[in-house]
């Protein structure tokens, strides 16, 4: 088999949690009179919580103390946890389960490669945990996407060389990370926004596992 493993980002690829991150950051922004736009939210995809706050404070032209930053990171996550506490399997994006099913049937290994420290909770709530042979999330990586660490750790955990891995990503930082790791990458989203992917799909309903061999 040309490829042995598929590595999935979580937020925006398997489930649509971007809306919850957006809401939680918007609520936090009230502390410093900042209204996050949809375009700015796009730039927060794939990057860590700490880096997201730094970007937001920069956009808001707000000089925060370390103490404020610590409190706000905690507060943002508490709001986010509250928002995701109601998540269930209906929030898995269209076509995902059928695609994972095909992968398993055809003997591919499956890993998660997410920047989120909340990945475990989201996988549990949506019933996705058991699909994964390895889970690499924000609790085990030290360098954020576009650094390839998260995907290289995923490939290592699966025992696969990078060249035998295909990454699925909705964020530009994630596509850049996969490429930096020497992997093939399928972008999930709009081809006008995502650059450098080997293929872009708008949804998993458009993709058959057999098409991966064309990458
Ligand atoms: C990524 C999201 O998957 O995880 C980012 O795309 C988010 O928007 C990052 O900031 C970190 O998530 P968390 O759950 O650890 O705050
Ligand atoms: Mg994502």
Image (cartoon, rainbow, N blue to C red):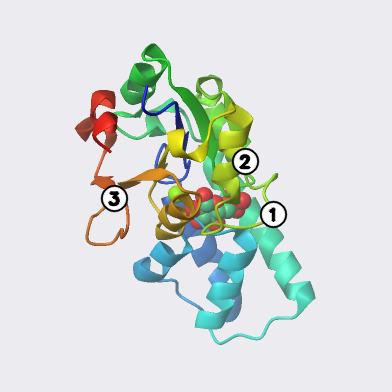
Q: Position of residue 184 (x, y in %)?
A: 38, 43
Task: Report the Cα–Cα distance between label 3 and label 1.
Answer: 27 Å
**Helix or strand or loop: what does disc 3 sit on?**
loop
Residue located 32% across and 21% down the image? 98
Viewer-closest of 98 and 4: 4
The label nearer to you, 3 versus 2, is 2
Q: Relative to 144, is 61 above or below?
A: below
Give the quarter of the figure containing the N terminus: top left
**Helix or strand or loop: what does disc 1 sit on?**
loop
Q: Name the residue that disc number 3 marks.
A: 189
Residue located 64% across and 64% down the image? 50
Q: Position of residue 59 (x, y in %)?
A: 50, 81
Q: Earlier in the sequence, mark 3 or mark 1?
A: 1
Give the quarter of the figure containing the C terminus: top left
Q: Name the residue that disc number 2 marks.
A: 153
Report which quarter residue 152 is drawn in.
top right
The label nearer to you, 2 versus 1, is 2
Q: Earlier in the sequence, mark 2 or mark 1?
A: 1
Q: Name the residue that disc number 1 marks.
A: 142
Q: Position of residue 14 (x, y in %)?
A: 41, 36
Q: Earlier in the sequence, mark 3 or mark 2?
A: 2
Task: Report the Cα–Cα distance between label 3 and label 2.
Answer: 25 Å
Q: Relative to 59, is 214 above or below?
A: above
């Amino acid at each position: 088999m040309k490829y042995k493993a598929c590595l999935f980002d979580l937020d925006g690829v398997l489930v649509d949690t971007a809306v919850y991150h957006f809401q939680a950051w918007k609520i936090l922004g009230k502390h410093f009179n900042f209204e996050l736009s949809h375009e700015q939210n796009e730039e927060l995809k794939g990057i860590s919580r700490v880096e997201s706050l730094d970007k937001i404070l920069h956009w808001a032209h707000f000089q925060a103390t370390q103490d404020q930053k610590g409190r706000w990171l905690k507060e943002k996550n508490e709001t986010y946890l509250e928002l995701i506490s109601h998540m269930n399997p209906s929030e898995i994006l269209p076509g995902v389960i059928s695609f994972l099913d095909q992968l398993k049937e055809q003997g591919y290994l499956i890993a998660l490669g997410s920047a989120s420290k909340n990945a475990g909770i989201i996988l549990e709530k949506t019933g996705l945990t058991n699909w994964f042979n390895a889970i690499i999330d924000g609790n085990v990586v030290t360098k954020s996407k576009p650094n390839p660490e998260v995907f290289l750790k995923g490939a290592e955990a699966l025992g696969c060389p990078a060249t035998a891995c295909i990454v699925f990503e909705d964020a530009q930082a994630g596509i850049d990370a996969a490429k930096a790791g020497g992997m093939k990458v399928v972008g999930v989203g709009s081809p006008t926004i995502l650059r450098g992917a080997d293929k872009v799909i708008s949804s998993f309903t458009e993709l058959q596992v057999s098409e991966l061999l064309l990458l």
